[in-house]
Image (cartoon, rainbow, N blue to C red):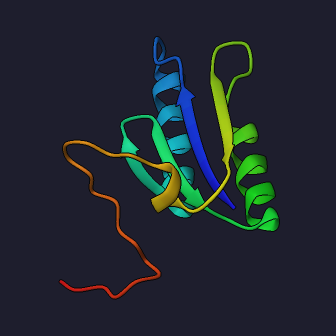
Amino acid sequence: MYLLVTYDISTETPEGSRRLRHVCQACKDFGQRVQYSVFEFDLDEAQLEILKHRLLELIEPNEDSIRIYRLRGKREEIVESYGVDKYVDFDGPLFF
């Protein structure tokens, strides 16, 4: 399933800055960053549960927020992107 995850982590304290780095790394482990606090994912239900569990262990619920949007359809059918788009289709051929 195709997902969009956004987060807002309070960085008013050193602990908040640490949480921000860890949340970002957890998202990078499963998906692609498309903006500073926005990631795109193509995951199955088991992978999504692992990601959610990991994120919920990292955040402070009274200070931070995470939103997970389940998108219907394939990325190329539902996403319009203008300007810089660094998305990499890992299912297609990769040329470097």
Relative depth, front residue between 16 and 46? 46
Where is residue 95 drawn, in percent x and y?
22, 86
Q: Closer to the camera, 29 or 92?
A: 92
The residue drawn where x is 63% and y is 20% is 64
Image spot of residue 1 (x, y percent): 69, 62
Q: Percent from the top left, x then y, of residue 25? A: 49, 51
* Residue 48 or residue 16, whichever sits in front: 48
Looking at the rendered image, the quarter that the C terminus falls into is bottom left
Horizontal side of residue 27 vs 3, given as left or right: left
Q: Is residue 29 left or right of residue 51?
A: left
* Residue that lies at the very extreme toward the front in this rendered image: 77
Q: Is residue 10 above or below residue 93?
A: above
Q: Is 29 situated above or below 15? A: below
Q: What residue is drawn where x is 81% and y is 66%?
A: 46
Please provide percent x and percent y for residue 38. 46, 39
Q: Residue at x 47, y 81 (%)?
A: 91
The residue lying at 26 percent from left, 52 percent from top is 85
Q: Is residue 61 above or below residue 34?
A: above
